[in-house]
Amino acid sequence: MLVGCHVSISGSIDKAVDNAVERNCTAFQIFTRNPRGWHAKDLTDIDISAFKEKLKKSNIDRMATCAHMPYLPNLATPKPDGFEKSVKTIVSESERCGKLGIPYLVTHLGSHLGTGEEGGINRLVDGLCTAGSVKNDVMILLENTAGQKNSVGSRFEQLGEIFGRLKPSKKFGVCLDTCHAFVAGYDLRTEQGVKESFEEFDRFVGMKHLKILHLNDARGELGCNLDRHYHVGLGGIGEEGLAAVIRIAKKNKIPIILETPIDDVRDDHGNIKKTRELVA
Ligand code: MN
Ligand code: MN
Ligand code: ZN
């Protein structure tokens, strides 16, 4: 089973591999730079070779790694300068992933800020297609959203509709976040609910496009639209449903990435261990 968590690059980017190895990860996710600002320091040749060397020496397959976009970009924004900066950022993140040999870049779909879904989606598609024109092997993954006000892409119908408009199609895939799906109204609490939700995902998006699974339990209840992650099995989704999701990911060899909190209840080790135990 490919399972790991989001790991820090604090110090230097190759430290991410150390952090992943230390946590017994067979998959991991990073930010390639500080996620809270617009600026990214260029990756040096030394950064790149150190990261690649460590990854090669580890037991982690390059194809089970991904990067997540920083927080500030919003590809659905009606503000022209914000949109331009957002597109520049996703293009640059794709290039950085290419240099590091990371195959997947996860992005949120953004917010239209109250100006309407149609325009928001049109801008999003436009921005994503620009990022898709970067000449490398990096695939951009659309992450389903929690359904917060003005956000797009929480329903699989809409995610599929957006996905279908992206060109070239081979540059795009999907990342499914279980917390986001649950708070957006998909009942993942039981095996039956998981089965039905994944059938719906398959119908509108297509299982073959699912490249990364974000395995997070939810702090909130079904359909609450609150993006608050919680420890595996201890939130609103619970063990039965998450075990069913893990089995699907395992069967389809989809890397599982945890984005769970670190607190007194549990740390990354604990959540990764729990994930393995649920299907042992
Ligand atoms: Mn995300
Ligand atoms: Mn996520
Ligand atoms: Zn989230």
Image (cartoon, rainbow, N blue to C red):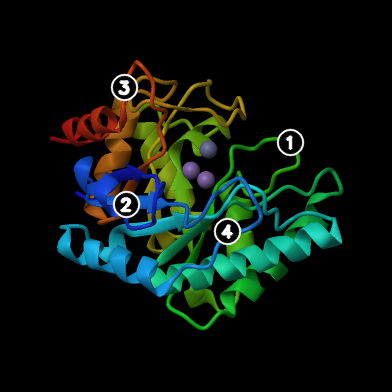
- Residue type for callout 3: Arg
Residue under numbered circle 2: 15
- Residue type for callout 1: Lys
Residue under numbered circle 4: 160
Q: Position of residue 112 (x, y in %)?
A: 78, 49
Q: Is residue 122 visible?
A: no
Give the CA separation, mark 1 to mark 3.
31 Å
Give the CA separation, mark 2 to mark 3.
22 Å
Question: Could you tell me if the residues under marks 1 and 3 are in contact, i.e. CB atoms within 8 Å?
Answer: no
Residue under numbered circle 1: 149
Considering only vertical position in the picture, is 216 above or below 76? above
Considering only vertical position in the picture, is 50 above or below 159? below
> What residue is at 53 percent from the left and 28 percent from the top?
228
Q: Where is residue 136 in the image (x, y as percent from the top left)?
A: 46, 80
Q: Residues within 10 Å of mark 4 (few under 14, many from 20)?
A: some
Sequence-earlier tag: 2 or 3 = 2
- Residue type for callout 4: Gly
